[in-house]
């Protein structure tokens, strides 16, 4: 009997986080055991804004794992299996730049930063607008992460930044992220 490989889905507070069931189901269909980790802002959307559409209980039921968003205490056991791969999606420009700078002030960023050193395959699917993408830190951050072996799906075939305040008019390329995961 083979055991499913474990995928950490790390989601930031961006509109595609409202549809995490889509990549979870697609990854499960591809043989992944999915664990969800939210940034603190994404967790705040889920807990403080019922209109955000992020149902933590439904996601936990779908994955069979608790949804994490903060570091555990040293005396607490790990509640998630170790990852075989990580999908950072949606990845905001804020988290992208902090990650590339090695900042690990949240569980999500700590896992992403550590995964580079552990050589865990990482796919990143950004989500930000064209004005944010024009900031020079974004280009540098993408180059840094790609240089570290991260598959950053930004540009043709991945995520293409949209005009400000027009996110709702553009489909998020979840299938490209799932297709980029290791076989």
Image (tube, rainbow, N blue to C red):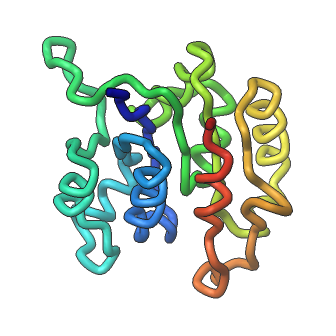
Q: Which of the 4 image quadrants contains residue 121?
A: top right
Image x and y of residue 16, in percent: 51, 68
Residue at the farthest bottom position:
169
User: How many numbered circles are shown?
Assistant: 0
Residue 156 rendering spot, x and y as whole percentages: 85, 62
Q: Nearer the viewer, residue 106 or 28?
A: 28
Quadrant of the rendering where the N terminus is positioned = top left
Locate the C terminus and report the quarter of the image it occupies: top right
Q: Residue at x 27, y 50 (%)?
A: 63
Q: Is 32 displayed left or right of 101 in the figure?
A: left
Residue at the spot 31% in from the left edge and 67% down from the top edge: 54
Q: In the visual, does 11 lie left or right of 152?
A: left
Place of residue 83 in the rendered image (x, y in percent of width and height, measured from the top left): 43, 27
Q: Residue at x 31, y 42 (%)?
A: 69
Left or right, residue 19 beside residue 161: left
**Residue depicted at x 26% and y 58%:** 59
Residue 11 at what x, y percent from top left? 46, 51
């Amino acid at each position: 009997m083979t055991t499913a490989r474990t995928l950490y889905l790390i989601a930031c507070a961006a509109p595609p986080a409202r549809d995490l069931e889509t990549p979870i189901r697609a990854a499960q269909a591809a043989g992944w055991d999915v664990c969800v980790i939210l940034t603190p802002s994404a967790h705040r959307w889920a807990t403080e804004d019922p209109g955000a559409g992020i149902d933590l209980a439904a996601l936990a039921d779908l994955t069979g794992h608790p949804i994490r968003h903060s570091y555990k205490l040293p005396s607490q056991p790990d509640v998630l299996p170790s990852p075989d791969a990580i999908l950072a999606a949606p990845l905001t420009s804020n988290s992208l730049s902090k990650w590339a700078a090695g900042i690990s002030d949240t569980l999500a960023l700590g896992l992403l930063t550590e995964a580079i050193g552990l050589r865990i395959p990482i796919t990143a699917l950004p989500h930000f607008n064209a004005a944010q993408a024009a900031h020079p830190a974004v280009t540098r951050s993408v180059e840094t992460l790609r240089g570290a072996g991260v598959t950053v799906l930004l540009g043709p075939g991945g995520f293409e930044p949209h005009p400000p305040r027009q996110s709702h008019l553009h489909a998020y390329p979840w299938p490209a992220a799932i297709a980029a995961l290791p076989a």
